[in-house]
Image (cartoon, grey):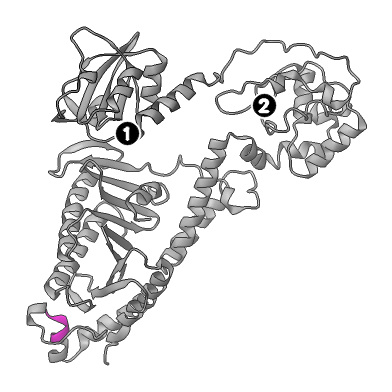
Amino acid sequence: MKPNLDILQLVQDVDWVVGSFIASPNGELLVYSMPSEFGEDELARTASRLTSIVRCAELCGLGVEQCDFSFSRYQLVVSRCAAGMLAVLVEAPVSRRALSMATRLVLRELPELVTALSNRAPPASAALQKRPAERAASPVPR
Amino acid sequence: MSNRFMNNTASRGAATPAALEMSAGVQRDLADLIRHAARSGGRHAYRVVAPGATGHIFFDTGRVIHAEFGEDCGLRAVNEMLRSGAVASERASGGWPAQATLHLSPELLLSLTERDMSRVVRKVDLPLEPPPLPEPFGGEPAELVAPVHRAAVYSPDGYPPAVYPSAVPPASPQAAAARSSSRDSGIVHTGATRAAAAASKRPASGIMPKLGSAAVAPASAPASDIVPPAAKAPPAASAPSTSPNSSALAKARPSAGSAALSTRGQRSSAAAIVRAREPRARASVAARAPRVAAAPSAPAPAPPSISPVPPRADSQPTTMVRITPRGELLAARGKNAEQVAEAAAFIHGLATAIAADLGRRARANVHLSGNGMSLLVARSEVNDIAAALGATDRVSSLLKKVGLE
């Protein structure tokens, strides 16, 4: 089953969305759609750190569903589900309602996407699931 | 109080201008000091003394940024200092407040405190027996307005004093008609309540009239209301004392209270709207909805924005901590504060690293939420790391401050 990698296009179509990526529950970067100024290494570290932050909050008794970061011009909006997390980098004027709807649509497809990515044939799945340094495939086309 | 806000950083600032110099043993008028400080830069701190209390006041680039006086701080402390005639006795040495509690210019600060000092004191000792009415009974309703209410001084909670004329004159038919029509329109009268109080010569409790209608209601009480409520009051007459209770309370409360209610109501309804978008959050909204509906027994009025808020007694208070960038605990309150402080330090570090990786070396503020609870970690204006863990609707004001609402 071919994973629907265009799912991130749902989020990209929202105005003022800079980019987005999907990570597994373990913090592994799976799919991303970001401008070239954001390297894969940075995104992979970010995904891992997000997972650590979520685990830290869970230790405080908080069941994390949503995680928002604000740093100057950008905001990183992270939504979690059992299958993984979707992180969307936006600028301030973004429509929160539109973003929320797009996020829900992506999260709805996330379990199938993650399953498909994990069940793919080794070369393609390796290209998508392995760490950025080992990956030969290009990111999701915008 | 002072220890909570002070850090160990010694006050620093430019050379003290001549206007702010304090010779040893010389006391200086506080208002004069504030005005002169407006023309100077740097940081200055002074010890303030008054009969029965002492405090400190802190200036930064000409503005008062913090004040402590007795048990008060901030604007309240400045107000008390000026009210008590406190004087600045000497320059203070030691810690500088970790957080500014005032952001007002000296002129505005003094004007606010002067206005406060000239305000009529709200709590007064009322006579045991009200003064007699000036006119004999039988006049027009307007003439029978009890002077007590017109000149009423309200108790600190905003309700009119529970003192009523010892006898209520018989009302004219016009007054009775006006009263019934106003009752139908939703304005709550306490005719039955007040009449019962008048009959028994004891203060009435429960519903208080709306401030605007207070001057008219007592005079328009019909003669038939001068009976105990259980004896003769018709159901319609007694209804105002029970069913529109909430609306009466909502309307009769002081503006700050009703604003707080409406604000909290709006906040809860706004939070419900935002959360309803999330698929999993719907369950949390549904779980919370019965709690809102089961709030105080009084029926909620039509606009949802002013529906009663569930009592806070059963909800966990927000845990709040402040730590330095190096992890030293500055202030803490609530359960598991130590753990929250550790989480705040850890999360802040990771958030800063994420911001750096994404090309934005800036203060990173983080908000994690789920099931109606939130954890907020933010960098304060004075470079402390502040964290709050509690119900999302309670930290919404903090979220607004850091731009994460």
Q: State the SS at label 1.
A: loop
Q: Give the amino acid type for the residue marked by disc 1 in the picture.
A: Thr
Which quadrant would residue B200 be assigned to in this image? top right
Q: CA distance from mark 1 to mark 2?
A: 39 Å
Indicate whether B253 appears above or below B394: above
Q: Give the amino acid type for the residue marked by disc 2 in the picture.
A: Ser
| Residue labelled with disc 2 | B205
Q: Residue at horizontal 72%, vertical 36%?
A: B241
Which quadrant does the C terminus of chain B fall into? bottom left
Q: Chain of mark 2?
A: B
Query: Residue B46, position in %: x, y?
Result: 24, 20
Task: Tally the marks.
Answer: 2
Dominant secondary structure of the magenta stretch?
Answer: helix
**What are the residue bounds of the magenta stretch?**
A126-131
- Of tags 1 and 2, the one toward the viewer is 1
Residue B378 in the magenta stretch? The answer is: no
Nearer to me, B145 or B298: B145
| Residue labelled with disc 1 | B101
Nearer to me, A94 or B338: A94
